[in-house]
Amino acid sequence: MPRESATAKRARTAEIIRRLRQAYPDAKCALDHQNPFQLLVATILSAQATDKGVNKVTPELFRRYPTPHDLAEAPPDDVKAIIRTTGFFNNKAKSIQGAARKIDLDFNGEVPDAMPELLTLPGVARKTANVVLGTAFGKNEGIVVDTHVARLAKRLGLTSQTDPVKIEKDLMALVPRDDWTIFAHLLIFHGRLCCFAQKPQCGRCPVNDLCPSAFKV
């Protein structure tokens, strides 16, 4: 099979995006939130957990501790008890309270809307920062690379990397910047509903003719 040129790969990527938009017109962040702070906390809690599981605990968490100051000052054991079912609750409680404390003290209680500042918050790496920037602030600063995005990007032949930072770099070179946020949502929806880790449903996939892995996984 001939090597795909960068121009051809970008064109194929654009067609993948077009078809997935048609297939998943409602693709969006599945974490329930009402403001950037809630999204930040929910995203930290979503590590090694399902969005559905996070959505079960955040209403009570935000009812009791609605602001960064409130969460920063909350008794750690209370926070742990609320978020326990999301797993790794000791580390997550430390991260969300640490992030809340820094937001309260260093950013006047407002979640920063720039990558460098977000990355100074405990528990926040590029994935979480990209979620907050793209979904809460409408800023396309990067592409969220979670397990679905990593799996599908490789299957679709858009990257050969396994490190999330390198995967993101490859995808940013292929996907138009205006589509960076929605692209991740589309791949996540497709990964959850069709392109499963085990036994992907290639027969009903809207991009199977554009996928080098179709019917081979």
Image (tube, rainbow, N blue to C red):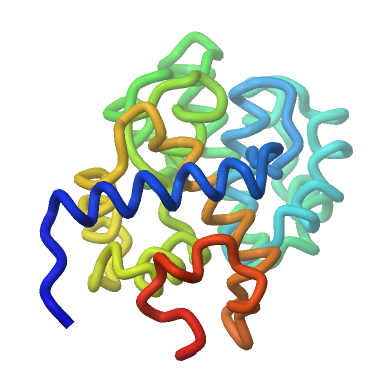
Q: Residue at x 48, y 42 (%)?
A: 18
Q: Where is residue 6 in the image (x, y as percent from the top left)?
A: 13, 54
Q: Where is residue 119 in the image (x, y as percent from the top left)?
A: 34, 36
In the image: residue 128, left or right of residue 80: left
Q: Which residue is drawn at 59% across and 23% down?
A: 36
Q: Position of residue 45 (x, y in %)?
A: 64, 51
Q: Residue at x 49, y 9 (%)?
A: 108
Quarter of the image for residue 12 reads bottom left
In this view of the protein, which residue sits in the foreground, 67 or 8? Answer: 8
Q: Which residue is drawn at 50% across and 70% down?
A: 208
In the image: residue 72, left or right of residue 174: right
In this view of the protein, which residue sits in the foreground, 141 or 62? Answer: 141
In the image: residue 50, left or right of residue 125: right
In this view of the protein, which residue sits in the foreground, 21 or 91? Answer: 21
The image shows residue 92, relative to residue 156, as above or below, that is: above
Q: Position of residue 195 (x, y in %)?
A: 59, 71
Quarter of the image for residue 156 reads bottom left
Q: How many labels does the image show?
A: 0
Going by the picture, which residue comes out furthest to the top? 108
Quadrant containing the N terminus in the rendered view:
bottom left
Going by the picture, which residue comes out furthest to the bottom? 216
